[in-house]
Amino acid sequence: MPCRFQNTTGFQAACGDLSVPEDRSDTDSPTITLHVAVFKALTSSPAPDPIVYLDGGPGVATLEFVSFGFDDVFLPYLQDRDVVFFDQRGVGLSEPSLACPEVVEVTKEILDVGPTVDEAVDRELEAWEACRDRLLAEGVDLATYNSAASAADVADLQRALGYESWNLLGGSYGSRLALTVMRDAPDGLRAAILDSVYPPHRSLIEEAPASFDRALDLLFESCADDGVCAVEHPELRERLFALVDRLDADPVEVSILDVFDGTTLDVSLDGTALISLVGWGLHSPDDIAVIPRMIDEIEFGDDTIVSELGSNLLALLGIGSGGMASSVQCHEEVPFSTPEGYAAAIEPFPEFSEFFAGRLDVGPAVFELCELWPAGFGGDIENEPVTSDLPALVLAGQFDPATPPSWGRSATETLTNSYFFEFPAMGHGASLHECPQSMAVEFLQNPTTEPDSSCIADMPTIAFAA
């Protein structure tokens, strides 16, 4: 079967569709299809155990974007192993798609108009309701799109491809899915690489404010400890929150590029939007490096860096399946948090209250979203740590604002054959650097032996822009 995505990696891929039951508890369930691509190892004598890549989000489309950064991210693994990619159920080129263009369109409108937080949340909830109604009318069972179902899909995929053994590579939500595979379908697993770990027993919602504050404090401390940054960008915390107050009182208009259609979108930059950009910037070392200069620029009416980060953030709207994300989170994450628990979590951080109030993924509005999204309930097992003796390499980025290093350490407490490493100056997605990548490749060669971590001492610190 020809690949249904544009492959610009320079390497050939064998593609196909895998049919799986939509509802695995129903013997008469209709089937859904997962689009799959296998990139063959570059050696003539590859290792018999390939890697299957589990993407994040939840809901990030894999295959349409696999070519972006392929050499940097996946080529090291392809030297001696096949690498298997697929779009998870409900995502990307798999069918049906649970993408919610209704929500994407409303989100863009909100960016342009700049309504109050309450007004924005109300409009987004209406869009989610419209997406729900359309998917239900199409016959989609929203309660069957979750991590346990996807883990069973992974096991089916391994059998269909004929691999007796393979390795898991999952980052962010992909690590959560990998842990679920280790829990539910361990047969045929050889080892797992878990990057930016999102373990089921940690609360994405009730820990989000503290996780964000930790990463932001690290940014301020790192700038103050850096000779150039301390001089060029003094009193960063005070100036950031003064700027947040100023923009809340008097927002400015900024133009950002939509990389998918080439159009330019005029957005209202208020204090909440600025905090969103800073939070997004904390995911990447390159972006962390320019946050202090961005604050300087905004103070003097320059929107160059704001426009660049804003364009990157806008692009995230076009690479995922919002419906799949909601089904997963409402099925297995939100049931274990409460509005009262969130209120207690945000109370120590009033400076972030408006920022989180407008978020339908980890803010208080997520409870309203899940009331209207019929995702079912995964059961108490989805709030318990995963216990496994499978060899696991657990990686964490020092600055990660979403899945902090403490989550990786917590996951290893019940992974009895695991190795944990935290990498300086890295954000969300630690394995993108040469050092952790080389350790991951070494780990796959012999997963029962701790990989050499001496390269960590030579990793650079954040190179703050002057």
Image (cartoon, rainbow, N blue to C red):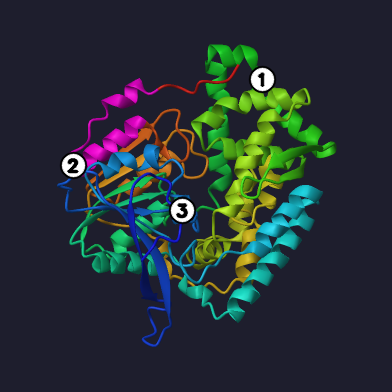
**Extent of the magenta region:** 434-459
Give the mark toward the camera: 1 or 3: 3
Query: Residue at 23% of width from left, 30% of height from top?
Result: 452
353 is within the stretch colored magenta: no
Give the SS element for disc 3: loop
- Of the numbered discs 1 and 3, the one sitting upstream in the chain is 3
> Which numbered dot is residue 6?
3
Residue 44: where, in percent of width, then height? 17, 46
Q: Compare residues 34 and 434 and report the one nearer the observer.
A: 34
Q: How many marks?
A: 3
Query: Residue at 40% of width from left, 55% of height from top?
Result: 176
CA distance for labels 2 and 1: 47 Å
Relative to residue 115, is residue 219 depicted above or below? above
Give the mark toward the camera: 2 or 1: 2
Query: Residue at 51% of width from left, 77% of height from top?
Result: 141
Q: Amino acid at mark 1?
A: Glu
Instruction: Tell me the quadrant of the picture where the C terminus can be found.
Output: top right
Q: Compare residues 187 and 201 and report the one nearer the observer.
A: 187
Give the SS element for disc 2: helix
- Of the numbered discs 3 and 2, the one sitting upstream in the chain is 3
Main SS class of the magenta portion in the image: helix
Give the SS element for disc 1: loop
- Of the numbered discs 2 and 1, the one sitting upstream in the chain is 1
Q: Could one spot residue 349 in this view of the protein?
A: no
In the rendered view, does 150 fall on the left or right side of 377?
A: left
Which corner quadrant of the image does residue 10 belong to? top left
> Which numbered dot is residue 235?
1
Q: Amino acid at mark 2?
A: Gln
Q: Are marks 3 and 2 in contact (CB under 8 Å)?
A: no
Q: Which residue is mark 2?
A: 445
